[in-house]
Image (cartoon, rainbow, N blue to C red):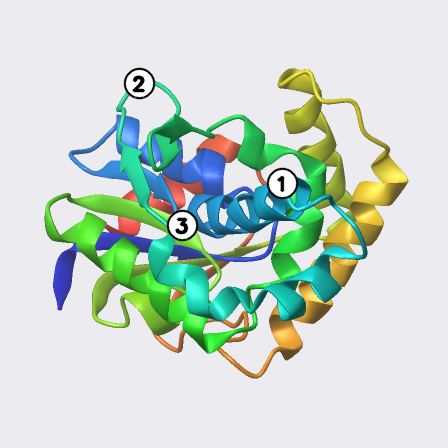
Amino acid sequence: MNENIIAIDGPAGSGKSSVAREIAQRSTYQYFDSGAYYRAVTLYFMKRHEELGGKGKFYDFLNHYEFLNKLNSIQLSATLQKKSENLIFLGQEDVTIEIRHPEVTGNIKYLAPYREVRDFINANLIELARVNRLIMDGRDIGTEVFPDAKFKFFLTADAKIRARRRWDELKEQGIDTDYEKLLEEIQKRDESDQNRKIAPLKQAEDAFLIDTSNLSKNVVINMILSRI
């Protein structure tokens, strides 16, 4: 078993990111949000779309652009920081803030289902973990990326609660958005993640399930720490 990885999976807004960050502060693990790489890849192609005139729907552009053949031209990297947000780079460009924009979130679903995209990102995640002791959150960390992780957790919560959490998070970052739109996006994302053919969102058989709907962050943190 791989003791260098703590895998925390679950749907958007279930609290896994904030919990994972806090556990990293209390341990020797470094925190990394695997979704940051999915966001970065999505942003990369959104920028290509804009550079070529931004005509047509984004998903139509992807097919026309033959984006799968261009994955290996993407340079993904991260600077892990213990006391602040990890820095995410596309080449030399810091995209840490930009990848959190709701428009990027809404477009991830067009790339995430492709096995080629997932293999490319997983290879980058595995390389990152090769030289770091990580607590990583995502949707398939314990099932696909690190199935040998010794510590696996699956966090979930009611969709309305998750939408409110995401709304609060964006507001703190100065991003103004509509709660109802966020709820709709989260529900659509859940359906897409759970029903995709490649690496669907699901609880690993050996993962510990925590419903965070009515639990404080500290309670969840202590539940995880006690099992570790």
Left or right of 101 in this view: 129: left
Q: Residue furthest bottom?
A: 197
Q: Which residue does the numbered mark 2 point to in the structure image? A: 83
User: Can residue 48 be spotted in the picture?
Assistant: yes
Q: Quadrant of the N terminus?
A: bottom left
Query: What amino acid type is highlighted by mark number 3?
Result: Ser
Where in the figure is residue 64, as x and y percent of width and height? 66, 68
Q: Residue at x 52, y 57 (%)?
A: 10
Choose top left, top right, bottom left or bottom right for residue 119.
Answer: bottom left
Q: Which residue does the numbered mark 3 point to in the structure image? A: 34
Gap between marks 3 and 2 measured at Cα = 18 Å
Q: Is the residue under label 1 in contact with that under label 2 (CB below 8 Å)?
A: no
Q: Residue at x 36, y 72 (%)?
A: 144
Left or right of 45 in this view: 124: left
Chain-order first, disc 2 or disc 1: 1
**Circle 1 sits in a helix, a strand or a loop, which is it?**
helix
Q: Which mark is residue 143?
A: none
Gap between marks 1 and 3 measured at Cα = 27 Å
Left or right of 123 in this view: 21: right
**Circle 2 sits in a helix, a strand or a loop, which is it?**
loop
Mark 3 packing: few (<14 Cα in 10 Å), some, or many (20+)?
many
Q: Residue at x 19, y 54 (%)?
A: 127
Where in the figure is residue 221, as x and y percent of width and height? 40, 38
Gap between marks 2 and 1 measured at Cα = 35 Å
Where in the figure is residue 146, as x and y percent of width and height? 27, 66
Q: Which mark is residue 51?
A: 1
Chain-order first, disc 3 or disc 2: 3
Q: Number of labelled discs?
A: 3
Choose top left, top right, bottom left or bottom right for residue 11.
Answer: bottom right
User: Can residue 214 be spotted in the picture?
Assistant: no
